[in-house]
Amino acid sequence: METHRPRTLPWGVAPALFTLALLAIPLVAMRYTDDVKWGPLDFLIMGVLLLGTGLGVEWAIRRGSSLALRAAWTMALLSTLLMTWANLAVGLLGGESNPVNMWLLSVPLVGIVGAVLSRRAPRGMVLTMLAMTALQLLFTAIAFSLDWRPLRRGAIDIWGPNGFFAMLFVTSAVLFASAPGQMERKLRGA
């Protein structure tokens, strides 16, 4: 009896289609409301962010050696995308259009550099995700202490969203740490 392999799309097609579908939402919305005002640069930036994240998630799903590792990479990529998107849209440190929000772009940069330097190894990614968490919280503390963001509801306005993203980064670090082989290497002292 012949076994059939499930058909899969060629690499990169699913993220490209998903990116186009998501970018179609503001494109269509702009035709029907004045509340959505995207320019070519907005579409370019979001296209790069969505496609890059989608390709990374597809890589993680296809290449991940364990469920924990696939989940860790997916969590790391999606939480970084969401944090960057929220920061670009509304500003997580200083409110909308405040240039201090650009500081948070260093958090994904730390993730990229950490992934390259660690050669995407789980142990190195644990440290990378913890460094991203620390940087997110450091910038939040600075923004709060210097009153960069107008606080309508108090400290929760700045600590709430930034703390949420820091929690997602820590969750990813825990998933990387729980990848098979990590605990055995720790016990052996490797």
Image: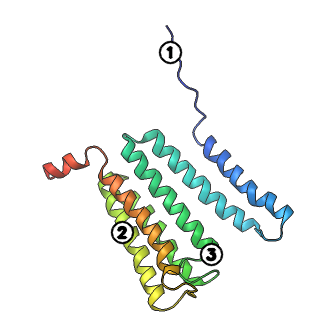
Question: Helix or strand or loop: what does disc 2 sit on?
Answer: helix
Which residue in the rendered view is the most extreme toward the left? Answer: 188
Which residue is found at the position 47% from the left and 51% from the top? 74
Q: Amino acid at mark 2?
A: Ala
Mark 3–mark 2 Cα distance, whole angstroms, equals 24 Å
**Counting other residues with Cα less than 10 Å from the Cα at mark 3, is it few (<14), some (14-19), or many (20 or more)?**
some
The Cα atoms of the two marked residues, 1 and 3, are separated by: 51 Å
Question: Which one is earlier in the sequence, the residue at label 1 or at label 3?
Answer: 1
Image-quadrant location for residue 91:
bottom right
Looking at the picture, tell me which residue is in the foreground, 141 or 105.
Answer: 141
The residue carrying pointer 2 sits among few (fewer than 14), some (14 to 19) or many (20 or more) residues within 10 Å by Cα, namely some
Question: Relative to 52, does residue 113 appear above or below in the rendering?
Answer: below
Residue 3, numbered label: 1
Task: Tell which tag, 1 or 3, sits nearer the viewer.
Answer: 3
- How many marks can you see? 3
Q: Residue furthest bottom?
A: 146
Camera sees residue 118: no
Q: Earlier in the sequence, mark 3 or mark 2?
A: 3
Residue 90's tag is 3
Label for residue 131?
2
The kind of residue on which mark 3 rests is Val
Q: Label 2 near label 3: C-beta < 8 Å? A: no
Please tell me whether mark 3 or mark 2 is closer to you in this view: 3
Q: For numbered disc 1, what is the local secondary structure?
A: loop
